[in-house]
Image: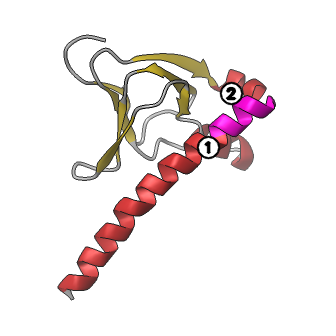
Amino acid sequence: MGGQDIYIYLRNGETDIAYMLKKGSITVELNAHDSFEIEDDNFIFGTPEILLSESDGFNHFRNFSVKAHPDTDYVRIPAKTVFQMISSYKVGFAMAKAIAEILVNVNTILTKKKNEVGEKE
């Protein structure tokens, strides 16, 4: 990818593409102050909003920004392909696991922030 981080997608952006992290690492940014890193080969990300859009019947926007670190390799997966892939047990399970991993990290950050606010009161 080069010598600096590059945004793969931005919060509130379009949701027509998911991604697979082939090698390297990404940072998931909740906002300007809160983020976490994921380093996992064949990690599929960017799917929750695509799945919600299909389920609800209207477009959802990205909840987070995601950026790739130098020497990270990832591939784009069109939304149509996501729906074809999810029917495969192994791929569907991998997507569910990836969504869960992101939600656990988000929950950890939000719980910490909630506790910090509670301590200030």
Quadrant of image for the N terminus: top left
Image vertical order of residue 27 relative to residue 21, above or below = below
Q: Amino acid at mark 2?
A: Val
Residue drawn at the location 38% of the way across and 69% of the way down: 111
Residue drawn at the location 24% of the way across and 75% of the way down: 116
- Labels in figure, total: 2
Left or right, residue 83 beside residue 34: right
- Please identify the residue farthest to the bottom as the structure is shown: 121
**Dot 1 corresponds to which residue?**
97
Q: Position of residue 91 (x, y in %)?
A: 71, 30
Circles 1 and 2: CB atoms closer than 8 Å? no
Q: Amino acid at mark 1?
A: Lys
Quadrant of image for the C terminus: bottom left
Q: Position of residue 19 (x, y in %)?
A: 53, 25
Left or right, residue 20 beside residue 32: right
Q: What residue range appears in magenta?
A: 86-95
Between the C-alphas of marks 1 and 2, the distance is 15 Å
**Dot 2 corresponds to which residue?**
82
Image vertical order of residue 3 relative to residue 34, above or below = above
Image vertical order of residue 34 relative to residue 61, above or below = below
Q: Secondary structure at mark 1?
A: helix
Q: Quadrant of residue 87?
A: top right
Q: Secondary structure at mark 2?
A: helix
Residues packed near mark 2 inside 10 Å, few (<14), some (14 to 19) or many (20 plus): many
Q: Earlier in the sequence, mark 1 or mark 2?
A: 2
Residue 69 numbered mark, or none:
none
Query: Does the magenta segment cover residue 53?
Result: no
Residue drawn at the location 40% of the way across and 44% of the way down: 64
Q: Main secondary structure of the magenta part?
A: helix
Choose between 19 and 88: the one closer to the eye.
88
